[in-house]
Image (cartoon, helix red, strand yellow):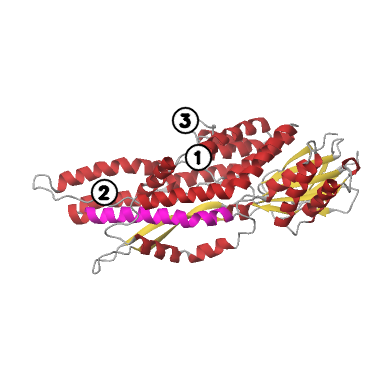
Amino acid sequence: MTSPVTWPRVSRWNSAFPQAWITGLLISFLVPPLLSGCAWRQAGNQADFDGRYSAGNYQEAAAFAARRGGGGYNEGTSLLWTLQRASALQAAGDHQEAIRLFDTTEAFFRVYDEEGALSRWLSTTGALITNDASRPYRGTLYDAIMVNSYKALGFLALGEPANARVELNRARDRQRRAVDAFSEQIRAEQRALAESGSETPEADMGATLSRAHDALDEEYEQLSRWSVYPDYVNPLATWLEGLFLMTRAEAPGDFERAAQALERASGMVPGNPWVRADYQWAEDLAAGRRRHAGLPRTVWVLYEKGLGPVKVERRIQVPVALRHSGTTTIYTGFAYPVLRYRLGVSSPLQLESGREEDVSTELLSSMEAVVSTEFSYELPRIVTRAVAASVTRTLLQYQLRRRFGDFAGFLGLIYQLVGTQADTRIWSSLPREFAIARSGWTQGEPVQLRFNGESHALELPDNRFVMVWVRQPSVAADPLIEVIPLSAD
């Protein structure tokens, strides 16, 4: 946090009006970036996009995202809107364009991953002067992992397993490096907070932050119940890798790697019988107890349903812990984001193959849990930045009014009000959850999918292993159903 301005003694000639004018000029440089990241505008754009996407109007949603900067990695474009546009196009079945856009998001992630300590210091310091909403959207670790997972699914749908293998390897590597990457981000922000003057002559920042965090104990407690997966690991990516390696084993050791991945996935969702059955197959193949050619025809259903959480703004007032006793108590207001969980498609999908009893999908990956886990680690730092910035603005307004009168204080109030905004940006087209089912099937006989009061008959290709990918963000949207051959035969 930047230290408050130390105002010099002024002469009779250079008194209230010139000083207020200079102050107004300074604030005029700070207010535009705050307005450019205005939370209400961000929330309005997201609501417009979400309305189109949840209704199943994917092409309209993609066009809306393109107008907001979803054009890939170029000057003036946005990582967030590129993610939104890519996922909308993929939901519309345009895998080629979706993969192209997801490819460009890798450039954003690479730049943010490789930026030096100075860039991170400047970014954090800038947030203390303005707010988080005015910074470029840098994405989350789960964003990057989902990009690789979606690209892998897109390549499988296009019949390009070699490219799918590359993306699954990248997803595994990202999950492996996630803890170290996040720890480095924390260290960089801590250095920036320490070096930018987090303590001021007027306020005890540590005591003020303690009061703010105490006021949010209930918020932290609600988030703690979501930490059900290992840090920054998404069971979807791990299961996809294992399933791919088991059904399309080509390289030496693929069965062993498949067993390792599916064992991890099964450990994360111990109640899912289908992941456990996949692991048992892979373990038998790796140990030589089964032959790959002897595995029966099998269909897996990947059911992507509902919509994940969004962020909304909350505001709270806390007293500033002043260093000088007897001084009038000053309160500062700060804004912070909280997650709002959306209702969605809740009924399981029933799979009827004619070979076995009907089976139902079981939870594979709760994106509510994935998002909430990472957000629970982020929120304390978000609150720290928000409080530090709010105290800076509050003390500036107080000093302006006390030294230069009501007009200067009014200018400081404008700066404070405009700057008190929470960053509510989030990749809102991610689903609420992924669920899976599996069953044997007979060539030439259709399989039936029943969900949300409808039945869909599917003819499967002449392929031993098949995935049926079903996407439905809401009951109002028509489901997208794609049949993807998994094996080479």
Bin the neighbour count of mark 2 within 10 Å (Cα to Cα): few under 14, some 14-19, many 20 and up: many
Q: Is residue 374 above or below residue 441?
A: below
- Labels 1 & 3 near each other (Cβ < 8 A): no
Q: Which residue is mark 3?
A: 75
Q: Amino acid at mark 1?
A: Tyr
Q: Which residue is mark 1?
A: 112
Residue 56 left/right relative to 111: right
Element under label 1?
helix
Q: Which residue is mark 2?
A: 411
Kindly tell me whether residue 64 is visible in this rendering.
no
Task: Give the magenta-colored segment's residue range.
Answer: 373-400
Image quadrant of residue 117? top left
Lower position in the chain sequence, tag 3 or tag 2: 3
- Secondary structure of the magenta portion, mostly? helix
Task: For marks 1 and 3, give the one nearer the viewer.
Answer: 1
Bin the neighbour count of mark 3 within 10 Å (Cα to Cα): few under 14, some 14-19, many 20 and up: few
Query: Which residue is nearer to you in this view: 162 or 394?
Result: 162
Is 7 in the magenta?
Answer: no
Q: Amino acid at mark 2?
A: Leu
Residue 367 left/right relative to 188: right
Q: Amino acid at mark 3?
A: Glu
Element under label 3?
loop
Lower position in the chain sequence, tag 1 or tag 2: 1
